């Protein structure tokens, strides 16, 4: 069986080293030593300040909106993402306003943002989808002009750099997910990286019920992560560069094997890519379905990522986004993970070529 991804597993002995620390000091959660060490290491690796390690990437998005006081307003967002991007907006009682995407790299089309701004708009929530960079400069310019906050859902962006800086360092707040299926994982987990220290201090309180001791300052939630999750993160941390290198190797091999047979996104200049996913676009949905059938017969299971276009969710009244809707019908992510052999990559490519050509 080959699935679209497989969680990276560090050596058990290295995980146990951090678990042993938990058993020795009996601190299981509430910003214990593992969480603190992981926060320090990830902040340094990413070159950022005001880093909050949280329970998951969805709560990170909700907390980001809450820390920026974004409630009951319109948020400009992309329809081409995982459902959590849209659901976090709705869960915070805001209205997602969908702006169509760039056909080349599937990020929000910055030339269409200004048309969607109304007096109710307070923020832009964009996604560095598959680890490709949004046009962060243009988005910042639009946000300044219209006095909007910028939140990046950077769930795919860990390890990607733009102009020498981590992609997660852009915007008023960037979030990431460390879910088991992501490039760097802590089983479940996520983070917020906050530009402004005052907002970051507010998030520090909000993520643990809004109080410190007996002093209650504001409405909060529980978004703290446990020491066991941090232990997995600490065990995985030394392997980040190796993980990215191995994924690059597999992606390069797919590139050479599949050349001319499927459409591939175009990388922006200035982007140092993290190889988080290997998306391919087929001619039409039927071709995608034919390829899936052939792969499934060989026990290979790619994923339709992302499908459907989020403006088409049954519980939203989304604007029409023809490019996102079209891409969503014919895009898939191919298996990509540490441990996938060259032989299997070639076999997958051969099956696809057999159907497409
Ligand atoms: C995975 C993902 C999330 C949600 O992260 P969780 O940690 O699973 O809650 C949000 N946005 C995008 C784009 C994702 O891929």
Image (cartoon, grey):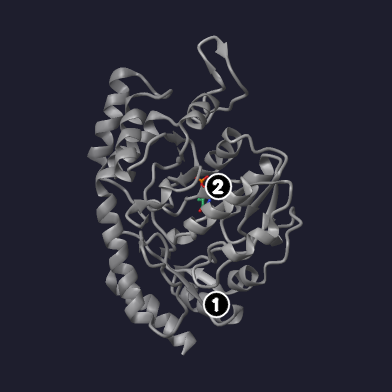
Residue at x 57%, y 62% (from the top left corner): 110
For label 1, count other residues whose C-alpha is less than 10 Å away and answer few (under 14), some (14-19) or many (20+).
Answer: many
Left or right: 57 as drawn, with respect to 43: right
SS at mark 1 in the image: helix
Picture quadrant where residue 230 is located: top left
Q: Which residue is mark 2?
A: 150
Residue 312: image location, x then y, percent: 70, 62
Residue at x 27%, y 34% (from the top left corner): 16
- In the picture, the quarter occupied by the N terminus is bottom left
Q: Nearer the viewer, residue 288 or 103?
A: 103
Left or right: 127 as drawn, with respect to 249: right
Q: Is residue 260 above or below residue 265?
A: below
Q: Is residue 166 above or below residue 351?
A: above
SS at mark 2 in the image: strand
Toward the bottom, the furthest residue is 357
Q: Which residue is mark 1?
A: 288
Toward the top, the furthest residue is 214
Toward the right, the furthest residue is 317
Q: Tell me which numbered mark, 1 or 2, is placed earlier along the sequence.
A: 2
Residue 77: image location, x then y, percent: 62, 54
Residue 117 got which mark? none
Whole-angstrom CA distance, mark 1 to mark 2, is 35 Å
Q: Nearer the viewer, residue 20 or 166?
A: 166
């Amino acid at each position: 069986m080959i699935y679209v991804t497989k969680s990276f597993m560090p050596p058990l002995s290295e995980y146990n080293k951090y678990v042993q620390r938990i058993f020795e000091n009996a601190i299981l959660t509430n910003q214990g030593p593992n969480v603190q060490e992981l926060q320090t290491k990830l902040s340094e690796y990413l070159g950022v300040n005001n880093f909050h390690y949280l329970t998951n990437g969805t709560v990170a998005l909700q907390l980001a909106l809450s820390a920026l006081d974004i409630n009951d307003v319109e948020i400009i967002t992309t329809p081409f993402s995982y459902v959590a991007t849209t659901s976090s907006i709705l869960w915070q009682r805001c209205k997602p306003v969908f702006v169509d995407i760039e056909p080349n790299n599937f990020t929000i089309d910055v030339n269409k943002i200004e048309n969607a701004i109304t007096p109710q708009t307070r923020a832009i929530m964009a996604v560095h989808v598959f680890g490709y960079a949004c046009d962060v400069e243009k988005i910042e310019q639009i946000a300044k002009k219209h006095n909007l906050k910028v939140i990046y859902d950077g769930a795919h962006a860990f390890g990607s750099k733009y102009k020498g800086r981590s992609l997660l360092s852009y915007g008023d707040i960037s979030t990431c997910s460390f879910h088991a299926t992501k490039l760097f994982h802590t089983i479940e987990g996520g983070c917020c990286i906050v530009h402004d220290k005052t907002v970051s201090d507010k998030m520090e309180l909000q993520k643990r019920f809004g109080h410190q001791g007996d002093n209650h300052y504001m409405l909060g939630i529980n978004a703290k992560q446990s020491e066991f999750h941090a232990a997995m993160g600490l065990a995985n941390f030394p392997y980040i560069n190796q993980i990215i290198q191995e994924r690059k190797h597999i992606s390069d091999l797919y590139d050479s094997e599949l050349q001319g047979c499927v459409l591939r996104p175009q990388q922006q200049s200035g982007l140092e890519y993290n190889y988080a996913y290997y998306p391919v676009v087929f001619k039409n949905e039927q071709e995608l379905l034919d390829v899936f059938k052939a792969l499934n017969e060989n026990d290979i299971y790619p994923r339709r990522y992302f499908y459907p276009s989020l403006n088409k969710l049954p519980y939203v009244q989304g604007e029409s986004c023809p490019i996102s809707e079209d891409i969503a019908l014919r895009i898939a992510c191919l298996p990509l993970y540490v441990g996938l052999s060259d032989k299997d990559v070639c076999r997958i490519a051969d099956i696809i070529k057999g159907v497409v050509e």
